[in-house]
Amino acid sequence: MAVSVIRHGAVTVYPGEKSGKYPDGNQVMVRGADTLVAFDTPLVANRMGRELLDADLVVLGHVHEDHMAGLHRLRHAPVHVHEADVAAARSWEGMARHYGYVPEVLARMRTMIEKDFHYAPRPDALAYKDGASWDLGGGVTVRAIHMPGHTSGHCVLLVEPGGIAFIGDIDLSSFGPYYGDATSSLAAFRRTLEAVKDIPAKVWITSHHKAVITDRETFLALLKAFASRLDAREEAIADHLGRQPSTLAELVARRFVYPKHLDDVYYADAERRVIEQHLEELARAGRAIDEGGRWRLV
């Protein structure tokens, strides 16, 4: 099956279905004079030929099932992962800790990702640190910039020349940031959404939805809208507590992240993790208080 391409200098993007909307993603390949690198391996990687299979190495911007969906086709290629996410790439046990869901959800999650995402751990995954760089030959380089929040090891991968930034799951979607796993952090995501503005980029590539953005003003407008979802969720929770003091379980059932009419294996656990973090922010700001397990607005 033919896959369309978008090229910017040394970078080629193979968009997934619906511009890489989850469960798919956008495959990014970077070619230097000596080395071909794959950034992540979403589902679209399974529809590619030599343009993927010739990869000399894989650099994961972060670890989630949808970013490992083509790794089973690249067993010959070394896989590099940020040190904070590498355990999740190496084993199911590490991935389970990464998600942090309850045991029965984890069991269902494993079955689902093995079937739908070709999930296969990479015990040989190599750890990299913030600032790690790869010289691909011919003046083409890749540098990892640690941008946590979505996961603890989430990184932006900056390609030079050209200032081409693969910003991963800072995906600029209307859904907004996702920080519903055990290693996710709302506070870190807020810092990341400020810091990403300062990366010396001229092109921004997302894992999902937007794919390629080539205008800074457009990028900043999309980033502002994306970041605004954080405050929108928090204010919705605060507004609800102002009208009806609630337990965490009641707030999870109310749904502030996912629509009530939709459900998936992990939605309740992710909703709980997101709401917990917003309650902590509201408490630190003196706006909400936990009274014996029931939260109310101050």
Image (cartoon, rainbow, N blue to C red):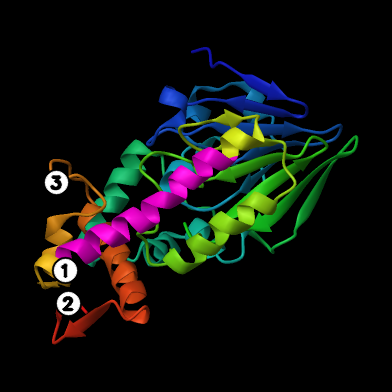
| Mark 1 element type | helix
From this view, report whether residue 117 is shown above or below residue 236.
above
Q: Quadrant of residue 105?
A: bottom left
User: Type of residue at label 1?
Assistant: Leu
Q: Quadrant of residue 253?
A: bottom left
User: Type of residue at label 3?
Assistant: Lys
Question: What residue would you read off at disc 1?
Answer: 241
Q: What is the C-alpha distance between the residues marked 1 and 3?
A: 18 Å
| Mark 2 element type | strand
- State which region is magenta: 220-241
**The label number, if any, that marks residue 295 in the structure image:** 2
Q: What is the C-alpha distance between the residues marked 3 and 2?
A: 21 Å
Evaluate whether residue 152 shows in this view. no
| Mark 3 element type | loop
**The label number, if any, that marks residue 143 in the structure image:** none
> Looking at the picture, how far across and down is residue 275, in whole percent?
27, 65
